[in-house]
Image (cartoon, grey):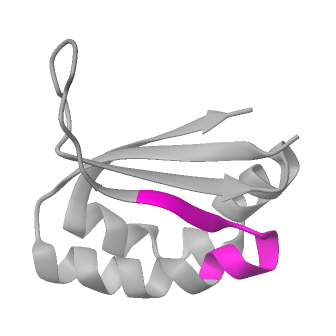
Amino acid sequence: MSALIVVDLTPTDKEKLSAYSTLAAPTLLPFGGEFLAKGPIEALHGDRAFSTKVVIQFPDRDSAVNWYHSKAYQDIIPVRELGMVSQFHLVG
């Protein structure tokens, strides 16, 4: 069964966020990850804590977890932290 990583984020530095995005996308490939959705959100019910959402699909839960904990991804987390405030959620 496929698994999703859902990222809620609010940009804090657009240049750093752009650099992070450029670095992060290739790290998904070895784990079969692909973007399903990425962009600003509109709250249809309740308060909106973040301005943007990203949904990444993986073939299975292990692939998603292994991607997040991979050296390639872990190495770019400092750039992520400079570019946005975020929460990552694993579904599936």
Position of 47 relative to 26 (above/below): above
The location of residue 62, given as percent across then percent down, is: 86, 49
Of all residues shown, which one is farthest toward the top? Answer: 46
Kindly identify the residue that appears in the image at 78 percent across and 70 percent down.
Answer: 32
The location of residue 28, given as percent across then percent down, is: 65, 74
- Report if residue 30 lies within the magenta region: yes
Q: Tell me which corner region of the image, top left, top right, bottom left or bottom right, holds residue 35.
A: bottom right
- The magenta span reads 27-37
The location of residue 13, given as percent across then percent down, is: 11, 70
Which part of the image, by quadrant, shows the N terminus?
Answer: top right
Q: Nearer the viewer, residue 62 or 72?
A: 62
Kindly identify the residue that appears in the image at 57 percent across and 56 percent down.
Answer: 56
Position of 71 relative to 5 (above/below): below
Position of 15 relative to 64 (above/below): below
Of all residues shown, which one is farthest toward the front? Answer: 44
Kindly identify the residue that appears in the image at 79 percent across and 79 percent down.
Answer: 30
Kindly identify the residue that appears in the image at 15 percent across and 18 percent down.
Answer: 47
